[in-house]
Amino acid sequence: MNKKYSIVIHGGAGTLVKGLMTPEKEEQYNTALNEALEKGYSVLENNGSAKDAVEAAVNHLEDSPLFNAGKGSVFTNDGTHEMDAAIMDGKTLDAGAVSLITGIKNPVSLARDVMEKSDHVFLAGEGAMRFAKSLDYSLECSEYFYDEHRYQQWQNIKDSDTFQLDHSMKKEGKFGTVGAVACDKEGNIAAATSTGGMTNKRWGRVGDSPIIGAGNYANNKTCAVSCTGSGEFFIRGVVAYDVSCLMEYKGLSLEEASSEVINKRVLELGGDGGLIAVDTEGNIAMPFNTEGMYRAYKTSNGQKEVSIYK
Ligand code: ASP
């Protein structure tokens, strides 16, 4: 029998107010999620690696203005876009991450280049941009990242000290950090996460997404995890690694460990959000403690789902 392989993606979790979502909008989200899912899945189907599959899926979500990553990134307090991303290979434990980068169309691919083409794991700001330049990355102008809705989100709070989760607005909105986790035909797993962070963030604020073990983690011994939610809490909870630890040290299943972290530990800290996870058997988990999480999964034994609410 062939080994089961699978992919799970997310486009952010939060207070997605159902009444404020139009059927047209919902359709757009479902379409974008479905396309990204199929992109990643076809890599697996064609004997590609989990690493290639998660990058392909995240690239697709980064190119959509619907999600808070790449093209759809939120505005900082200075009216700019500062993006964070990470990728990790569960087979080798190789990892790459970037934060506070600007003008890069696909931050997760730069994170992958950090992993594969530098001696480092994590490059930030100016330095990360110089690294991108050394690899001849072209830079998008600020108009590429401009989005009227996100501009209005920022205008509403820019003169305050508030910063907010893109997807927790009590208005119809475009939500979410994006991520993908996958298990390939060889039983190798990988995780990738990409985000514009939080609206109106200042002072070089970095969230959990690019921090290995907080918002993103993969280890063939246990699981691959990508998180979304209020980053400060996910950093303090070392959330992605915590799921892995519960499996490794306590022998919990993927489902049990993921649920324990999101529905108990993160809540006890006061954080909201969710995560997606896979193990090397192709099992999946997608817990969230918010009203909704944009998510989708597909497995080689014919299961598939694209959903937003509980
Ligand atoms: N976790 C991300 C951050 O704090 C935000 C999100 O998930 O939307 O930067």
Image (cartoon, rainbow, N blue to C red):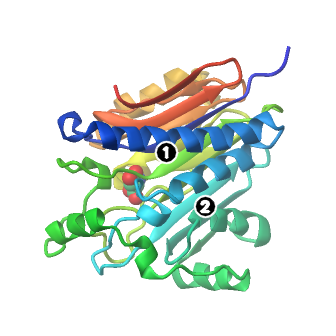
From the top left corner, tell me how far across and down residue 295 is, in percent: 46, 36
Quadrant the C terminus occupies: top left
**CB of mark 2 near ligand 1 (< 8 Å):** no
Q: Residue at x 58, y 26 (%)?
A: 284
In percent of the image, x 40 and y 44: which residue is there? 28
Name the spot of residue 247 as percent of width and height, x first.
Answer: 60, 28
Task: Assess disc 2: are there few (<14), some (14-19) or many (≥20) residues with their C-alpha within 10 Å of its C-alpha.
Answer: many
x and y, in percent, of residue 40 in the image: 66, 42
Q: Find residue 100 and name its label.
A: none
* Viewer-closest of 60 and 108: 60
Q: Comparing marks 2 and 1, which lies closer to the viewer? A: 1
Q: Cβ–Cβ below 8 Å for labels 2 and 1?
A: no
Q: Quadrant of the N terminus?
A: top right
- CA separation, marks 2 and 1? 18 Å
Residue for point 51% across, 70% down: 99
Residue 26 vertical placement versus 214 (above, below): above
Viewer-proximal residue among 298 and 260: 298
**Does residue 241 appear to the left or right of 91 in the view shown?**
left
Is residue 154 something that shows in the picture? Answer: yes
As displayed, is residue 91 above or below residue 136?
A: above
Q: Nearer the viewer, residue 173 or 120?
A: 173
Question: How crowded is the residue under tag 1: few (<14 C-alpha within 10 Å), some, or many (20+)?
Answer: some
Q: Position of residue 216 (x, y in %)?
A: 56, 49
In this view, which residue lies farthest toward the top?
A: 1
The numbered mark at residue 108 is 2
Q: Which residue is mark 1?
A: 32
Report ligand 1 position as a quadrant.
bottom left
SS category of the residue bearing label 1: helix
Q: Nearer the viewer, residue 129 or 304?
A: 304
Name the outermost residue toward the front: 24
Q: Amino acid at mark 1?
A: Ala
Please name the residue shown 48% across and 82% down the image. 141
